[in-house]
Image: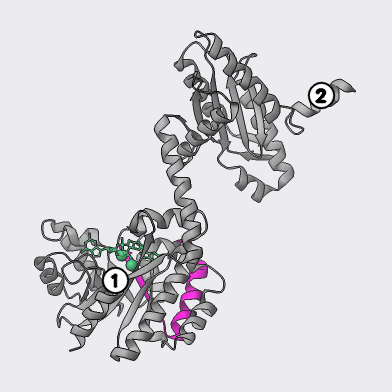
Amino acid sequence: MELRLQHGILHDALTGLPNRLLLSDRLSQAIKRSQRHPDYHFAVIFLDLDRFKFINDSFGHPVGDRYLVAVATRLYRCLRAIDTCARMGGDEFVILLDDIASVDQVISVAERILQQLDRPLEVSGHLLHSSASMGIVFGSAEYNDPAEVLRDADVAMYRAKAAGKSRYVVFQPAMREAAQARLALEHDLRRAVTLREFVVYYQPIVNIHSGKLIGFEALVRWQHPVHGLLSPAAFLNIAEEIGLGTAIGWQVVELVCQQLAEWRQTLSANDLSIHVNLSARQFMVPDLYARLVQVLEQYNIPPQSIKLELTENTLMEYSQEAAAVLAQLRNYGIQIVLDDFGVGYSSLSYLIQLPIDQIKIDRNFIIQIDQNHHSQAIVNAIVNLARGLHLEVVAEGLETVEQVERMRMVGCDYGQGYLLGQPLPTEEASQFLQRAMM
Ligand code: C2E
Ligand code: MG
Ligand code: MG
């Protein structure tokens, strides 16, 4: 009875593997030993399954459980008797390789695990494919505490995930700093959303035949209290990953409507339209339409003054639902712009099926238009196609007079780029607008 109790305290009930407690104990033994004996080395592999959530969600928890047991068995077979394979919870496993002779020995274990998991597993009549991401840490005299080793192994494991999963990454001290910087950024972002530290810059969009200003694209910036003004590239993806993208998106919508209301009132800029970028997540929130209508009404903005920019990838990802949402927005009077056109999936059939009003040709085609005949041919074809479908075309990233000239010649009507106007803070955008209206 006592033995059984003891076993229960130190082992995982599902797989029978050692649990976190027993692993910690063995790991702290290994740390102590390596501090006393310079010839003794150990390594830790932190392993996280790549498809567990998918398997759980699609086949149910009983199958998920059996899948974990089957994986545990495979892992166990890759190890020697002196090694410890523990289940930390969920789909996380930690392997302690004791008394290792070389780095290669550890790497070959990691490779064997990848091979073992690569063969499909039969669980309850389903043939399941599995793979894992692994972070490897080599024990060193620097470590004092099992938690430090596990933290570093975890950091390396995340690198493996980010690099495309189904692989191993060996921990390096520089990763620790990067991980800390990332944690700090996440923390700052949460605070930034609460304190509303985001501002909007406005980049002019002009008619390249008449030179007339027709609108602005709203581009978010983060006024970071320490790092200064940050571009979307420095924070938007991370914000999306931690679920803050939509909150930031709504703050942008609100700032834009506030600003537009002011311009309409003080400068009578009634024809001015503002383009707002929507992330995939923000696009698919169920109350997008209702909330947009509410904000527009609150600031008394006609729907014709707002254009929503979506990328091809967003629309493809949600192709089924997208058409319905777009139709609803368009019925209300909001125009839809397909952003970064040409770099995504670019399925032409989608151009015809989806209710859109305008496409923006990606900057990458414009950059090469002077030198590269292929780019010219592509741009030409895009403009012709768009015209045939009665869509407006905006060229992005116009930086030189020659580029503007070429776009004009192929029949593109609108342009945006540093040559025509940089993204401007509110004050300068107001001045730009005032000059344009004179
Ligand atoms: P985008 O929507 O394609 O916006 C155009 C980007 O190109 C902007 O970068 C703009 O500053 C830059 N750009 C404009 N003209 C030129 C030019 O002549 N040369 C070059 N090299 N670049 C030019 P920015 O402001 O850094 O924004 C990057 C991306 O971040 C945007 O690409 C958009 O996808 C995203 N983004 C910006 N604001 C928001 C937002 O409020 N919500 C969401 N979801 N995404 C946003
Ligand atoms: Mg855009
Ligand atoms: Mg773009």
Q: Amino acid at mark 1?
A: Pro
Q: Distance of mark 2 from mark 1, alpha carbons?
A: 66 Å
Colour scheme of this structure image?
A: one colour
Give the quarter of the image for residue 261: bottom left
Tell whether circle 2 marks a residue whose Cβ is less than 8 angstroms from ligand 1: no
Asked whether, in this view, residue 54 is left or right of residue 275, the answer is right
Give the residue number, with chain letter if any, for mark 1: 425
What label sits on residue 6 in the rendered view? Answer: 2
Element assignment for label 2: helix
Q: Is residue 65 above or below residue 406?
A: above
- Specify the segment rendered in magenta: 317-341
In-front residue for pair 274/195: 195
Q: Tell me the quadrant of the picture where the C terminus can be found.
A: bottom left
Residue sitting at 52 percent across and 29 percent down? 114
Asked whether, in this view, residue 11 is left or right of residue 292, the answer is right
Q: Tell me the quadrant of the picture where the N terminus can be found.
A: top right
Give the quarter of the image for residue 151: top right
Residue sitting at 19 percent across and 62 percent down? 366
Q: Earlier in the sequence, mark 2 or mark 1?
A: 2
Q: Is residue 333 above or below residue 198?
A: below
Residue sitting at 48 percent across and 68 percent down? 283
Q: Residues within 10 Å of mark 2 (few under 14, many from 20)?
A: few
